[in-house]
Amino acid sequence: MKICIACSAGGHLTEILQLQDFYNTKNHFFVVPKTKDSEHLSEHEPVYFINITYNRLKRLKTIIYLFQNLKILLKEKPDVIITTGAGSALSMCYLGKLLRKKIIYIESFARITTPSLFGKLVAPVSDLIIVQWKPLLKYYKKAVYGGPIFTFQSMTREKKGEYIFITVGISSFGFERLLKEVDKLIDLRIITQKVIAQTGKSKYKPKNYETIDFLSADKLLELMSKSSVVITHGGVGSIISALALGEPTIVVPRYKKFNECVDNHQLEITRELEKEGVILPVYDITHLPEALRKAEKFKPKNFTLSEGNIKNIIRNYLKKLF
């Protein structure tokens, strides 16, 4: 049995990497876009890197992905495709179905009450759908509940870091609203501490603090670990990384109305983690100074995210098939 693991970079990749104990014992290969946070895969995994294009002509982009994925499928001949979404993984799943491959889709940890667009599109060709939150069971006919793909216990750090670190992930959307607000707060001397930001695709260039467009996974964790507080968008990978390191974490979810994302799904995970008392949410950007003040003395509640049953569900499903 050969497994194709297809997903986007960023949070989608972070989630699929939680299944290492499972797929490392199988004949497998990755298909992911080549970005700063995915290039490390080539060091220890068989991987095909998809050439990303942000061309506005969506049909052209789809055709490019289609041919890249078809070439890989015909060469590798996998029996199963496992995906957490999104982007180019959709054409991989549809092509796989045409070639009679089994499709396993794991819905994002960020999706708590509403399914993702990718999930809606891939559902018709999926043989098994695993959701991480029970409210989603009603949206997918083939869904089973697997619990969280992540596992960690939150902690608090004793040592205060050297700077404020901002990360906006690798989204094709910018997050100018956050970057401009921080620049303004530095001008007003409300923020006096050093700031370092990972700015992604944002077009706005801050004038008051250091920026890096994209970071490798290792460098991102290094910068997080030395910071006094992390300000992040509502991306699952960014949030979980900060919490696992014990960082005081401020979450500023992206909004569709500001053209920062395709929908308001980042609100779901932000609200859920706020209920748990492990993050400081900022739903209105003008409230960022208040969140920064709270972060100085913020003591998150003890929060244990116990590993779900996703690995066993996949293992048992494949055992019956092969």
Image (cartoon, rainbow, N blue to C red):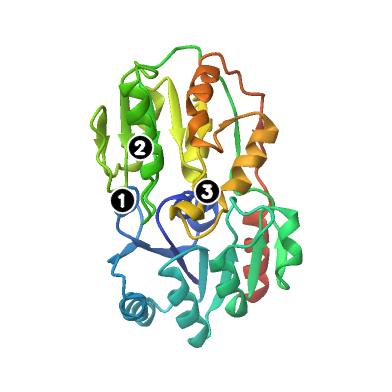
The answer to whether 29 appears left or right of 60 in the picture is right
- Which residue is rendered at x = 66% and y = 24% of the image? 301
Q: Are discs 2 and 3 less than 8 Å apart at CB?
A: no
Labels 2 and 3: the sequence-earlier one: 3
Element on which disc 1 rests: loop
Q: Nearer the viewer, residue 83 or 134?
A: 134
Camera-side mark, 2 or 1? 2
Element on which disc 3 rests: helix
Q: Are discs 2 and 1 less than 8 Å apart at CB?
A: no
The answer to whether 95 appears left or right of 71 in the picture is right
Disc number for residue 179 = 2
Q: Position of residue 33 (x, y in %)?
A: 34, 61
Disc 3 marks which residue?
18
Residue type at mark 1: give it: Lys
- Which residue is rendered at x = 39% and y = 78% of the image? 73
Disc 1 marks which residue?
201
Residue 129 visible at all: yes
- Which residue is rendered at x = 49% and y = 25% of the image? 247
Q: Position of residue 116 (x, y in %)?
A: 58, 63
Labels 1 and 3: the sequence-earlier one: 3
Labels 2 and 1: the sequence-earlier one: 2
Disc number for residue 42 = none
Residue type at mark 2: give it: Leu
Camera-side mark, 1 or 3? 1
